Amino acid sequence: MERPRSQQRRILTALLGKSAPATPCCVIAHGAPSTGKSTCIETFLKDENLSYSWVNCDECATSRILLQRAIKQILPADESGLYLQCENIDIFCSLVKDEFRRRNSSERHVLVLNKFDQMPEYHTQLDLLATIPRFSELDMPPQFSVIVVLQQSEPKPLLANLQTPRIFFPRFTKEEVLQVLEDCDLEPKNSFRSTFFTVLLQAVEPIMGTDASRILRAAHRIWPEFYTEERNATNQFNYKRYLFGTEYLVDTLPPTPPSIATNIDRIPSLCLIAAYLSSYNNPRYDMRCFSLAKSLRSNRRETRPKKAAVISPRSLQPPVFEMERMLAILHSIMPNPFEVYMQREVSTAIATLLAQNLITVNQGDVIDSRAKWRIKAPWSYIQLVANDINFPILDYIAE
Protein backbone atom coordinates (compact mmCIF):
# COMPACT_ATOMS: atom_id res chain seq x y z
CA MET A 1 0.00 0.00 0.00
CA GLU A 2 1.22 3.49 -0.87
CA ARG A 3 2.17 5.84 1.90
CA PRO A 4 -0.30 8.66 2.65
CA ARG A 5 0.06 11.60 0.25
CA SER A 6 2.52 9.76 -2.00
CA GLN A 7 0.51 10.75 -5.09
CA GLN A 8 0.57 14.44 -4.13
CA ARG A 9 4.30 14.11 -3.45
CA ARG A 10 4.89 12.77 -6.97
CA ILE A 11 2.97 15.69 -8.46
CA LEU A 12 5.06 18.18 -6.47
CA THR A 13 8.23 16.48 -7.64
CA ALA A 14 7.11 16.61 -11.27
CA LEU A 15 6.20 20.30 -11.04
CA LEU A 16 8.81 21.79 -8.71
CA GLY A 17 11.52 19.15 -8.25
CA LYS A 18 15.13 19.81 -9.22
CA SER A 19 14.80 17.41 -12.14
CA ALA A 20 11.72 19.20 -13.53
CA PRO A 21 12.55 20.82 -16.89
CA ALA A 22 10.38 23.90 -16.24
CA THR A 23 8.55 25.03 -13.13
CA PRO A 24 5.19 26.82 -13.09
CA CYS A 25 5.03 30.27 -11.53
CA CYS A 26 2.19 29.18 -9.22
CA VAL A 27 0.82 25.94 -7.80
CA ILE A 28 -2.44 25.70 -5.84
CA ALA A 29 -2.62 23.11 -3.04
CA HIS A 30 -6.14 22.83 -1.69
CA GLY A 31 -8.18 20.54 0.50
CA ALA A 32 -10.07 20.42 3.77
CA PRO A 33 -8.19 21.11 7.03
CA SER A 34 -6.07 18.31 8.54
CA THR A 35 -5.41 16.61 5.21
CA GLY A 36 -1.60 16.90 5.30
CA LYS A 37 -1.10 19.83 2.92
CA SER A 38 1.46 21.80 4.92
CA THR A 39 3.31 18.71 6.17
CA CYS A 40 3.56 17.20 2.69
CA ILE A 41 4.81 20.44 1.12
CA GLU A 42 7.35 21.14 3.86
CA THR A 43 8.71 17.59 3.74
CA PHE A 44 9.02 17.78 -0.05
CA LEU A 45 10.94 21.07 0.05
CA LYS A 46 13.35 19.75 2.67
CA ASP A 47 13.93 16.42 0.93
CA GLU A 48 14.56 18.16 -2.40
CA ASN A 49 16.89 20.62 -0.64
CA LEU A 50 15.14 23.55 -2.30
CA SER A 51 15.48 27.14 -1.21
CA TYR A 52 12.10 28.26 0.10
CA SER A 53 10.30 30.89 2.16
CA TRP A 54 7.28 30.14 4.34
CA VAL A 55 4.58 32.65 5.31
CA ASN A 56 1.60 31.76 7.51
CA CYS A 57 -1.07 34.01 6.04
CA ASP A 58 -3.51 33.52 8.92
CA GLU A 59 -1.08 35.64 10.98
CA CYS A 60 -1.16 38.50 8.44
CA ALA A 61 -3.92 41.05 8.87
CA THR A 62 -3.40 42.67 5.45
CA SER A 63 -1.75 41.83 2.14
CA ARG A 64 0.91 44.46 2.89
CA ILE A 65 2.03 42.53 5.98
CA LEU A 66 2.01 39.30 3.97
CA LEU A 67 4.20 40.74 1.20
CA GLN A 68 6.54 42.35 3.74
CA ARG A 69 7.09 39.04 5.54
CA ALA A 70 7.66 37.28 2.23
CA ILE A 71 10.20 39.80 0.95
CA LYS A 72 11.98 39.74 4.33
CA GLN A 73 12.72 36.04 3.83
CA ILE A 74 13.65 36.34 0.15
CA LEU A 75 15.90 39.40 0.30
CA PRO A 76 18.83 39.76 2.69
CA ALA A 77 19.02 42.70 5.07
CA ASP A 78 21.19 45.67 4.17
CA GLU A 79 24.31 46.75 6.07
CA SER A 80 22.25 48.47 8.75
CA GLY A 81 20.17 45.34 9.34
CA LEU A 82 17.02 46.84 7.81
CA TYR A 83 14.82 45.38 5.10
CA LEU A 84 13.26 47.10 2.10
CA GLN A 85 9.65 48.14 2.43
CA CYS A 86 7.10 46.32 0.29
CA GLU A 87 3.83 48.22 -0.01
CA ASN A 88 2.05 46.33 -2.79
CA ILE A 89 2.37 43.50 -5.29
CA ASP A 90 4.06 45.70 -7.93
CA ILE A 91 6.89 46.63 -5.55
CA PHE A 92 7.15 42.98 -4.50
CA CYS A 93 7.63 41.83 -8.10
CA SER A 94 10.19 44.56 -8.75
CA LEU A 95 12.23 43.66 -5.65
CA VAL A 96 12.18 39.94 -6.49
CA LYS A 97 13.33 40.56 -10.07
CA ASP A 98 16.17 42.82 -8.89
CA GLU A 99 17.28 40.23 -6.33
CA PHE A 100 17.41 37.38 -8.84
CA ARG A 101 19.30 39.52 -11.32
CA ARG A 102 21.80 40.36 -8.58
CA ARG A 103 22.27 36.69 -7.68
CA ASN A 104 22.74 35.69 -11.33
CA SER A 105 22.03 32.12 -10.31
CA SER A 106 19.77 29.37 -11.64
CA GLU A 107 18.88 28.17 -8.13
CA ARG A 108 15.16 27.81 -7.65
CA HIS A 109 13.25 29.46 -4.85
CA VAL A 110 9.74 28.56 -3.68
CA LEU A 111 7.49 30.90 -1.72
CA VAL A 112 4.81 29.05 0.29
CA LEU A 113 1.73 31.08 1.26
CA ASN A 114 0.21 28.76 3.83
CA LYS A 115 -3.47 29.12 4.84
CA PHE A 116 -3.98 31.95 2.38
CA ASP A 117 -7.77 31.81 2.70
CA GLN A 118 -7.50 32.14 6.49
CA MET A 119 -6.42 35.77 6.26
CA PRO A 120 -8.69 38.27 7.99
CA GLU A 121 -11.00 39.85 5.41
CA TYR A 122 -9.99 37.15 2.93
CA HIS A 123 -12.52 38.29 0.31
CA THR A 124 -10.76 41.67 0.07
CA GLN A 125 -7.51 39.88 -0.84
CA LEU A 126 -8.85 38.10 -3.94
CA ASP A 127 -7.06 40.57 -6.22
CA LEU A 128 -3.74 39.34 -4.83
CA LEU A 129 -4.81 35.73 -5.36
CA ALA A 130 -5.70 36.54 -8.96
CA THR A 131 -2.33 38.25 -9.60
CA ILE A 132 -0.04 35.49 -8.31
CA PRO A 133 -0.86 32.95 -11.10
CA ARG A 134 -0.03 35.69 -13.64
CA PHE A 135 3.56 36.17 -12.48
CA SER A 136 4.83 34.78 -15.78
CA GLU A 137 3.12 37.67 -17.60
CA LEU A 138 4.91 40.14 -15.31
CA ASP A 139 8.40 38.92 -16.37
CA MET A 140 9.09 37.32 -13.01
CA PRO A 141 12.20 35.06 -12.85
CA PRO A 142 11.39 31.56 -14.15
CA GLN A 143 13.16 29.99 -11.15
CA PHE A 144 10.75 31.70 -8.72
CA SER A 145 7.56 29.80 -7.87
CA VAL A 146 4.71 30.28 -5.40
CA ILE A 147 2.68 27.57 -3.66
CA VAL A 148 -0.67 28.86 -2.43
CA VAL A 149 -2.24 26.60 0.21
CA LEU A 150 -6.01 26.88 0.59
CA GLN A 151 -8.17 25.10 3.15
CA GLN A 152 -10.97 24.55 0.67
CA SER A 153 -12.00 21.42 -1.17
CA GLU A 154 -13.04 23.57 -4.14
CA PRO A 155 -11.26 26.93 -4.53
CA LYS A 156 -14.14 28.91 -6.04
CA PRO A 157 -12.16 32.12 -6.82
CA LEU A 158 -9.82 30.08 -9.05
CA LEU A 159 -12.38 28.11 -11.05
CA ALA A 160 -11.93 30.39 -14.06
CA ASN A 161 -8.13 30.03 -14.07
CA LEU A 162 -7.52 26.64 -15.65
CA GLN A 163 -3.83 27.20 -16.41
CA THR A 164 -2.66 27.07 -12.80
CA PRO A 165 -1.72 23.53 -11.65
CA ARG A 166 -3.72 22.35 -8.66
CA ILE A 167 -3.04 19.59 -6.18
CA PHE A 168 -6.05 18.29 -4.30
CA PHE A 169 -5.65 16.74 -0.86
CA PRO A 170 -8.69 14.57 -0.06
CA ARG A 171 -9.62 13.52 3.45
CA PHE A 172 -7.69 10.60 4.89
CA THR A 173 -9.16 7.12 4.71
CA LYS A 174 -9.13 4.82 7.73
CA GLU A 175 -6.14 2.92 6.37
CA GLU A 176 -4.19 6.14 5.86
CA VAL A 177 -5.01 7.34 9.38
CA LEU A 178 -3.67 4.06 10.76
CA GLN A 179 -0.45 4.54 8.79
CA VAL A 180 -0.10 8.08 10.17
CA LEU A 181 -0.58 6.72 13.69
CA GLU A 182 1.97 3.97 13.10
CA ASP A 183 4.57 6.58 12.14
CA CYS A 184 4.14 8.56 15.38
CA ASP A 185 6.71 8.54 18.21
CA LEU A 186 4.72 6.67 20.86
CA GLU A 187 6.85 4.09 22.65
CA PRO A 188 7.21 1.13 22.72
CA LYS A 189 6.58 0.22 19.08
CA ASN A 190 5.06 -3.26 19.17
CA SER A 191 1.95 -5.13 18.09
CA PHE A 192 0.24 -4.02 21.29
CA ARG A 193 0.48 -0.41 20.10
CA SER A 194 -0.94 -1.30 16.67
CA THR A 195 -3.97 -2.93 18.27
CA PHE A 196 -4.43 0.16 20.43
CA PHE A 197 -4.50 2.40 17.33
CA THR A 198 -7.13 0.21 15.67
CA VAL A 199 -9.40 0.26 18.72
CA LEU A 200 -8.88 4.00 19.19
CA LEU A 201 -9.81 4.76 15.57
CA GLN A 202 -13.02 2.76 15.90
CA ALA A 203 -13.89 4.66 19.08
CA VAL A 204 -13.17 8.22 17.88
CA GLU A 205 -14.34 8.00 14.26
CA PRO A 206 -17.99 8.87 15.11
CA ILE A 207 -16.69 11.97 16.92
CA MET A 208 -13.74 13.09 14.77
CA GLY A 209 -14.22 11.32 11.46
CA THR A 210 -10.80 10.76 9.86
CA ASP A 211 -9.15 13.94 11.13
CA ALA A 212 -5.64 12.55 11.50
CA SER A 213 -4.22 15.46 13.52
CA ARG A 214 -6.94 15.35 16.18
CA ILE A 215 -6.83 11.54 16.40
CA LEU A 216 -3.07 11.71 16.81
CA ARG A 217 -3.43 14.22 19.66
CA ALA A 218 -6.00 11.95 21.29
CA ALA A 219 -3.58 9.00 20.99
CA HIS A 220 -0.81 10.95 22.71
CA ARG A 221 -3.24 11.88 25.47
CA ILE A 222 -4.63 8.38 26.13
CA TRP A 223 -1.60 6.13 25.47
CA PRO A 224 0.42 6.98 28.63
CA GLU A 225 -2.59 6.20 30.81
CA PHE A 226 -3.52 3.09 28.83
CA TYR A 227 -0.21 1.28 28.45
CA THR A 228 1.35 -0.71 31.27
CA GLU A 229 3.86 -3.54 31.02
CA GLU A 230 2.21 -5.56 33.78
CA ARG A 231 -0.77 -6.80 31.75
CA ASN A 232 -1.10 -8.49 28.40
CA ALA A 233 -3.10 -6.91 25.59
CA THR A 234 -6.42 -8.71 26.25
CA ASN A 235 -6.48 -7.93 29.96
CA GLN A 236 -5.40 -4.36 29.40
CA PHE A 237 -8.20 -3.63 26.92
CA ASN A 238 -10.74 -5.14 29.30
CA TYR A 239 -9.37 -3.24 32.30
CA LYS A 240 -9.08 0.16 30.53
CA ARG A 241 -12.22 -0.13 28.44
CA TYR A 242 -13.56 3.10 29.89
CA LEU A 243 -10.82 5.07 28.11
CA PHE A 244 -12.55 4.40 24.78
CA GLY A 245 -16.02 5.42 25.93
CA THR A 246 -17.63 8.42 24.27
CA GLU A 247 -18.01 10.41 27.49
CA TYR A 248 -14.39 9.90 28.51
CA LEU A 249 -13.12 10.76 25.02
CA VAL A 250 -15.09 14.00 24.93
CA ASP A 251 -13.82 14.97 28.40
CA THR A 252 -10.18 14.11 27.74
CA LEU A 253 -9.83 15.25 24.14
CA PRO A 254 -7.06 17.83 23.67
CA PRO A 255 -8.35 21.36 23.15
CA THR A 256 -9.23 22.13 19.56
CA PRO A 257 -7.75 25.13 17.76
CA PRO A 258 -9.58 28.38 18.53
CA SER A 259 -10.91 28.77 14.99
CA ILE A 260 -12.61 25.37 15.07
CA ALA A 261 -14.07 25.91 18.54
CA THR A 262 -15.35 29.34 17.50
CA ASN A 263 -16.99 27.97 14.36
CA ILE A 264 -18.75 25.20 16.28
CA ASP A 265 -20.19 27.76 18.71
CA ARG A 266 -21.30 29.96 15.81
CA ILE A 267 -23.08 27.23 13.83
CA PRO A 268 -26.54 27.54 15.48
CA SER A 269 -26.42 31.32 15.07
CA LEU A 270 -25.28 31.06 11.47
CA CYS A 271 -28.01 28.49 10.74
CA LEU A 272 -30.62 30.90 12.08
CA ILE A 273 -29.19 33.76 10.02
CA ALA A 274 -29.09 31.56 6.90
CA ALA A 275 -32.74 30.62 7.48
CA TYR A 276 -33.67 34.29 7.71
CA LEU A 277 -31.74 35.17 4.55
CA SER A 278 -33.21 32.27 2.58
CA SER A 279 -36.68 33.34 3.71
CA TYR A 280 -36.59 37.07 2.98
CA ASN A 281 -34.07 37.23 0.10
CA ASN A 282 -35.44 36.65 -3.37
CA PRO A 283 -33.72 33.63 -4.98
CA ARG A 284 -32.78 35.68 -8.06
CA TYR A 285 -30.40 37.75 -5.90
CA ASP A 286 -28.49 34.75 -4.53
CA MET A 287 -25.57 35.06 -6.96
CA ARG A 288 -25.21 38.75 -6.14
CA CYS A 289 -25.45 38.37 -2.35
CA PHE A 290 -23.66 35.08 -1.69
CA SER A 291 -21.15 34.58 -4.50
CA LEU A 292 -17.45 34.76 -3.59
CA ALA A 293 -16.70 36.64 -6.81
CA LYS A 294 -16.27 40.36 -6.13
CA SER A 295 -17.81 41.35 -9.47
CA LEU A 296 -21.04 39.56 -8.59
CA ARG A 297 -21.17 40.94 -5.05
CA SER A 298 -20.74 44.53 -6.15
CA ASN A 299 -23.58 46.94 -5.56
CA ARG A 300 -25.31 47.10 -8.91
CA ARG A 301 -27.91 49.69 -9.69
CA GLU A 302 -31.40 48.35 -10.19
CA THR A 303 -32.69 49.83 -13.47
CA ARG A 304 -36.19 48.38 -13.45
CA PRO A 305 -38.92 50.61 -12.00
CA LYS A 306 -39.97 49.79 -8.46
CA LYS A 307 -43.19 50.35 -6.63
CA ALA A 308 -42.92 52.23 -3.39
CA ALA A 309 -43.09 49.79 -0.48
CA VAL A 310 -45.86 50.92 1.83
CA ILE A 311 -45.10 48.22 4.45
CA SER A 312 -41.69 46.75 5.12
CA PRO A 313 -41.62 43.08 4.04
CA ARG A 314 -39.95 42.24 7.35
CA SER A 315 -43.14 43.24 9.12
CA LEU A 316 -45.17 40.70 7.15
CA GLN A 317 -45.36 36.97 7.59
CA PRO A 318 -42.03 35.43 6.51
CA PRO A 319 -42.11 33.41 3.27
CA VAL A 320 -41.35 29.69 3.35
CA PHE A 321 -37.99 28.36 2.20
CA GLU A 322 -36.42 25.03 1.29
CA MET A 323 -33.76 23.42 3.45
CA GLU A 324 -31.46 22.81 0.46
CA ARG A 325 -31.28 26.55 -0.31
CA MET A 326 -30.71 27.37 3.36
CA LEU A 327 -27.75 24.95 3.52
CA ALA A 328 -26.26 26.49 0.36
CA ILE A 329 -26.49 29.97 1.90
CA LEU A 330 -25.02 28.65 5.16
CA HIS A 331 -22.01 27.25 3.27
CA SER A 332 -21.50 30.64 1.64
CA ILE A 333 -21.62 32.77 4.81
CA MET A 334 -19.64 30.39 7.04
CA PRO A 335 -16.03 31.65 7.38
CA ASN A 336 -14.38 28.20 7.33
CA PRO A 337 -16.98 25.64 6.23
CA PHE A 338 -14.49 22.77 6.07
CA GLU A 339 -13.12 23.15 9.60
CA VAL A 340 -16.17 21.51 11.12
CA TYR A 341 -18.01 18.34 10.33
CA MET A 342 -20.90 19.96 8.56
CA GLN A 343 -23.35 17.08 8.50
CA ARG A 344 -23.17 16.36 12.23
CA GLU A 345 -22.86 19.92 13.57
CA VAL A 346 -25.43 21.48 11.23
CA SER A 347 -27.95 18.72 11.86
CA THR A 348 -27.58 19.25 15.61
CA ALA A 349 -27.95 23.02 15.20
CA ILE A 350 -31.11 22.66 13.08
CA ALA A 351 -32.62 20.26 15.62
CA THR A 352 -31.85 22.78 18.39
CA LEU A 353 -33.50 25.64 16.48
CA LEU A 354 -36.50 23.44 15.77
CA ALA A 355 -36.84 22.49 19.45
CA GLN A 356 -36.67 26.18 20.44
CA ASN A 357 -39.40 27.02 17.89
CA LEU A 358 -37.11 29.48 16.10
CA ILE A 359 -37.75 27.62 12.84
CA THR A 360 -40.60 25.29 12.04
CA VAL A 361 -41.84 23.01 9.27
CA ASN A 362 -44.69 24.69 7.45
CA GLN A 363 -45.47 21.97 4.90
CA GLY A 364 -44.43 18.32 4.82
CA ASP A 365 -42.31 16.26 7.18
CA VAL A 366 -38.94 17.11 8.72
CA ILE A 367 -37.18 14.27 6.92
CA ASP A 368 -38.76 15.12 3.56
CA SER A 369 -36.42 17.03 1.25
CA ARG A 370 -39.42 18.77 -0.33
CA ALA A 371 -40.64 20.15 2.99
CA LYS A 372 -41.20 23.89 3.33
CA TRP A 373 -39.73 25.62 6.35
CA ARG A 374 -40.59 28.93 7.98
CA ILE A 375 -38.58 31.09 10.35
CA LYS A 376 -40.30 32.23 13.54
CA ALA A 377 -37.67 34.66 14.86
CA PRO A 378 -38.32 38.39 14.17
CA TRP A 379 -35.81 40.78 12.64
CA SER A 380 -34.97 42.35 16.00
CA TYR A 381 -33.87 38.95 17.34
CA ILE A 382 -31.90 38.10 14.20
CA GLN A 383 -30.09 41.44 14.42
CA LEU A 384 -29.09 40.73 18.02
CA VAL A 385 -27.77 37.28 17.06
CA ALA A 386 -25.78 38.74 14.16
CA ASN A 387 -24.27 41.45 16.35
CA ASP A 388 -23.36 38.87 18.98
CA ILE A 389 -21.16 36.94 16.52
CA ASN A 390 -20.02 40.05 14.59
CA PHE A 391 -21.76 38.97 11.39
CA PRO A 392 -22.53 41.78 8.85
CA ILE A 393 -26.03 40.62 7.99
CA LEU A 394 -26.98 43.89 6.25
CA ASP A 395 -24.34 43.16 3.59
CA TYR A 396 -26.24 40.05 2.55
CA ILE A 397 -29.79 41.39 2.45
CA ALA A 398 -31.13 42.32 -0.97
CA GLU A 399 -33.68 45.07 -0.41
Image (cartoon, rainbow, N blue to C red):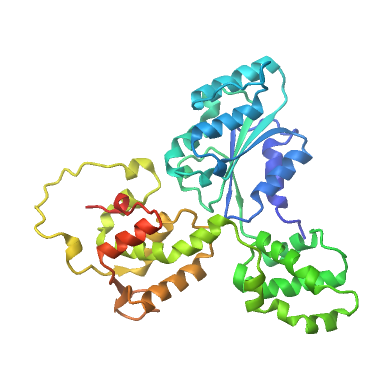
Q: Is residue 279 visible?
A: no
Position of residue 398 in the picture relative to residue 227 (left or right): left
Position of residue 330 in the picture relative to residue 276 (left or right): right
Q: Which residue appears at 74% of the width and 44% of the height?
A: 43
Where, by quadrant of the figure, is residue 270 drawn?
A: bottom left
Position of residue 386 in the picture relative to residue 53 (left or right): left
Q: Residue furthest right?
A: 230
Q: Can residue 294 be seen in this view?
A: yes
Position of residue 135 in the picture relative to residue 361 (left or right): right
| In this view, 233 is above or below 62 | below
Q: Which residue appears at 62% of the width and 32% of the height?
A: 145
Q: Position of residue 248 (x, y in %)?
A: 66, 76
Q: Which residue appears at 55% of the width and 50% of the height?
A: 151
| In this view, 150 is above or below 171 | above
| In this view, 241 is above or below 278 | below
Q: Where is residue 115 in the image (x, y as percent from the top left)?
A: 57, 45
